[in-house]
Image (cartoon, helix red, strand yellow):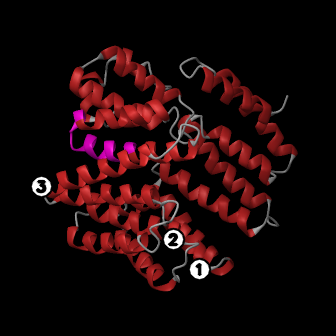
Amino acid sequence: MNAASILDEFLNDSSTNPLSKHDSLLIQAYNLVKKELVKSNYSFEQVQLAHKIYGYMGDQGLNERVQLMREFLQNNLEASLENKFWANWELVDNLALLKRYREMIEEQKLFFEWTTNNMSDQYLIKVMFDSTQAIGWVQENQEDEWFEIYNQLIKKVEPTSQNRHDRILLVETATGLLIYNLHRYHAAKIELERYYDILNENTNWDQYNRFYIRLKSYQLGLYSGQDDWEKYDDIVEDAKVKIRSSASRISKEDKEAIDDVCDMAHELGTCLMWERRYEQAIPLFEYALENQGTGVTHFFYAICIWATRKDRNKTLHHLQSAESSIRGNGGLRSRYIHMFLEQPEFQEVWDDEEFLSVFNR
């Protein structure tokens, strides 16, 4: 038996019985991959396998990922540029997830310089487009420098259909910082216009509907910040129409299309949840849970259920599902305790042992 086969067994058992404990298999895969890494001298294939295993192991796993990326980069000087790019990106991203922001910014600056010297300009967008990473610059009061880099990239990188996805993610991240972190609503409007223009370069783009709803979510954030609830409600209705229309056109066999619609429902539900419009959010989350069921959807649904109904058993069930799910949960699995203890809806049960026992602490 090797680490890959044990991981497959863990994933299969976790999918079949998501609420049962399967971590003994995960630990077995972890111990095996540690040995396989050394034996292979940190080959790219083994590093990717270890990265996947560590992603299900909470904070410990993310810290292991950081060390893993550093060891790969140090031990594989002859690795391809693509593989080095991946490892550098993952190093920065996992530091961001751990909120080791100062360290993350230092690494991201080095990564940006390395990419400038070794890769095409298209890759520079990928270095900077992630929102979790960008928030670290704001937390360390370096947002002005982040936006300097952002504006340089917007001017420098030639728009193509191939980089549309990356460009829209970069603009999305800038928009989110301006709305949610910096509350610079006039500047956010300019970025929303840029977002709209990129999205409408091709209305037949296979990711058009997905990003259409994401654009609507940022418009909701803007109108919420400006207390313009009439426009907010109009956007909600428009988004619901788009989701219903998309859902009506897909077949049960088209798993990818179903996932797209579930992501859209989750996106809108999340916006409504943050505004404490729980009853509006619940049916959207229920659709996503019934047809997809990612860990974070379980968590957000639990927030809504607890806030509106104080249904203890149902809330605990969905918190447990969030904590143990493998679906869409890499890097989040076994880490929901952080979100739980920051969520005001759960304040009355922050020290409740039954609730705390759900989480792998």
Dots 1, 3 in contact, CB < 8 A: no
- Report the front residue among 118 and 167: 167
Identity, as a three-letter code, of the amino acid under mark 3: Glu
Write down the residue under mark 3. Answer: 230
Tell me, yes or no, if residue 16 can be seen here. Answer: yes
Residue 164 is marked as 2
Placement of 272 over or under 163, stated as above or below: above
**Label 3: which secondary element:** helix
- Report the front residue among 132 and 165: 165
* Residue 46 location (% of width, % of height): 78, 46
Write down the residue under mark 1. Answer: 121
Tell which circle, 2 or 3, labels the residue nearer the N-terminal end: 2
Identity, as a three-letter code, of the amino acid under mark 1: Asp
* Residue 218 location (% of width, % of height): 30, 59
For the point 34% across and 37% down, the residue is 284
**Which quarter of the figure has residue 269?**
top left
